[in-house]
Image (cartoon, rainbow, N blue to C red):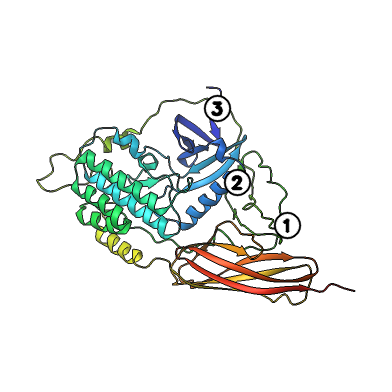
């Protein structure tokens, strides 16, 4: 018990920690009420792994997809890194599936909610990576929300397969043919078609999904900056979010690269040692919502179980479906690309050439993935660029350093990998005659 954490950043941890793939979840109590606290696994708490976690959290927050449990903070304290959510990350659907429940309408609701949330992430260029009942939680309002979004690597196809598998589990539990049919459609025709089919069988009211608002790109075009010699040491109770914006650049013609980003920090938190009670378990009100169906419903009429609160039942599913049908039919597309130096190098020596790649789109929001290839054999890692709604072109930059005398014909290739494959090449000549 002496090694169990008790306090983090002024929040008291209650109950028994729940193990997950990425660490241990706790319920945390603070002045603003209950929150969730994930103590990250040590393997995710340092170096490049931590950089990736912070970048993914920032990307998910920026996308603002309804149906993701919001991350309120990411802090390090006493050598440990904590992810703090705005509500407790419990109970999970996996926990509730182990308890008696006779109402299949809440299963339909969970399937629709989570499918719509996944589609919103995919439209914005993100994936969950580890989707399943173990990281779907029921919030205080009774809605289903996803946790641990983007902490694992993955792709759209694996997310869809995992969602279809969840539908089959729910169908086996309640014997609902609509869930089975939607799972089959998802495997063959994708998530949007399955949601359309599933919504046609539902008699539940769902909250409208709010379209993601334009946000500042998570990964900015590369700007000249000193190459950090080492990662900054993280102070006790350091905030890792705030203005964190990971960047990536290709350095000199010898291929020097920098690891994404430096962390903006601010002090805070507490080191008090408080011994707490254990064993609070699943909240009784939420557990009760999953234990029994509605009393004696009329024949051939299904009602939403108590998992959906009365405040939500006023939403119209028709409006939700209509919006998603429209949004799904207008995803982000890349229509072309071109590459050229911002300024021809002329006969200057010891210079850095700013190579500009201009990517044209259809003006829908989302994320573009790309990489740079140089004629000297060097290549960047895959980079990401956010595109706001209405933005029909975006510039990305490669800063290429040259030194020494002589002439070199340089070729830079911009390879767009998503959401559509495009490639463009630009050429220029570095010619340094030196001085006499």
- Whether tag 2 and tag 1 are in contact, CB under 8 A, the answer is no
The residue that appears at 62% across and 57% down in the rendered structure is: 248
- Left or right of 171 in this view: 67: right
Q: Nearer the viewer, mark 1 or mark 3?
A: 1
> Does the image show residue 24?
yes
Where does residue 180 sit, x and y in percent of width and height?
23, 47
The residue indicated by pointer 2 is 48
State how far apart marks 1 and 3 are (Cα).
Answer: 43 Å
Of callouts 2 and 1, the N-terminal one: 2
When the figure is inspected, residue 95 is found, relative to residue 189, above or below; the finding is above
Local crowd at mark 1 within 10 Å, few (<14), some, or many (≥20)? few
Outermost residue, right direction? 436
The residue that appears at 68% across and 42% down in the rendered structure is: 233
- Whether tag 3 and tag 2 are in contact, CB under 8 A, the answer is no
Where does residue 5 sit, x and y in percent of width and height?
54, 29
Mark 1 falls on what kind of element?
A: loop
Which numbered marker is on residue 123?
A: none
**Residue closest to the eye, 242 or 127:** 127
Local crowd at mark 2 within 10 Å, few (<14), some, or many (≥20)? some
Which numbered marker is on residue 274?
A: 3
Q: Nearer the viewer, mark 3 or mark 2?
A: 2
**Residue closest to the eye, 331 or 391:** 331
Of callouts 1 and 3, the N-terminal one: 1
**Residue closest to the eye, 131 or 416:** 416
The residue that appears at 25% across and 61% down in the rendered structure is: 318
The residue indicated by pointer 1 is 226
When the figure is inspected, residue 148 is found, relative to residue 6, above or below; the finding is below
């Amino acid at each position: 018990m002496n090694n169990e954490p008790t306090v983090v950043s002024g929040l008291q941890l209650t109950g028994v920690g729940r193990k997950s793939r990425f660490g241990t979840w706790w319920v945390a109590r603070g002045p603003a009420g209950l929150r969730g606290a994930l103590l990250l696994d040590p393997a995710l708490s340092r170096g490049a792994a931590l950089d990736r976690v912070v970048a993914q959290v920032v990307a998910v927050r920026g996308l603002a997809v309804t149906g993701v449990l919001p991350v309120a903070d990411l802090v390090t304290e006493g050598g440990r890194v904590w992810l703090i959510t705005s509500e407790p990350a419990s109970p999970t659907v996996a926990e509730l599936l182990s308890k008696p429940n006779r109402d299949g309408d809440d299963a339909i609701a969970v399937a629709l909610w989570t499918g719509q949330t996944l589609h919103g992430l995919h439209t914005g260029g993100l994936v969950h990576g580890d989707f399943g009942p173990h990281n779907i939680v029921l919030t205080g309002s009774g809605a289903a929300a996803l946790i641990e979004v983007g902490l694992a690597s993955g792709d759209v196809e694996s997310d869809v397969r995992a969602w279809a598998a969840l539908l089959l589990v729910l169908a086996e539990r309640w014997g609902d043919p609509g869930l089975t049919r939607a799972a089959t459609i998802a495997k063959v025709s994708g998530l949007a078609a399955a949601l359309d089919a599933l919504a046609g069988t539902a008699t539940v009211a769902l909250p409208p999904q709010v379209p993601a608002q334009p946000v500042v790109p998570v990964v900015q075009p590369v700007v000249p900056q000193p190459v950090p010699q080492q990662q900054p040491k993280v102070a006790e109770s350091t905030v890792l979010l705030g203005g964190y914006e990971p960047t990536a650049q290709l350095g000199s013609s010898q291929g020097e690269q920098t690891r994404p980003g430096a962390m903006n920090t601010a002090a805070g938190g507490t080191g008090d040692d408080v011994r707490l009670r254990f064993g609070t378990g699943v909240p009784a009100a939420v557990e009760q919502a999953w234990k029994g169906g509605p009393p004696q419903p009329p024949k051939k009429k299904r009602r939403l179980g108590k998992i959906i609160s009365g405040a939500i039942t006023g939403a119209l599913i028709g409006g939700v479906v209509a919006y998603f049908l429209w949004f799904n039919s207008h995803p982000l597309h890349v229509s072309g690309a071109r590459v050229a130096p911002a300024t021809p190098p002329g006969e200057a020596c010891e210079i850095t050439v700013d190579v500009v790649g201009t990517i044209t789109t259809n003006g829908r929001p989302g994320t573009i993935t790309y990489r740079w290839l140089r004629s000297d054999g060097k290549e960047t890692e895959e980079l990401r660029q956010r595109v706001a709604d209405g933005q029909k072109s975006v510039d990305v930059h490669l800063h290429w350093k040259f030194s020494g005398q002589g002439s070199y014909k340089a070729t830079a290739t911009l390879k767009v990998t998503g959401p559509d494959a495009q490639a463009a090449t630009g050429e220029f000549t570095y010619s340094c005659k030196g001085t006499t």
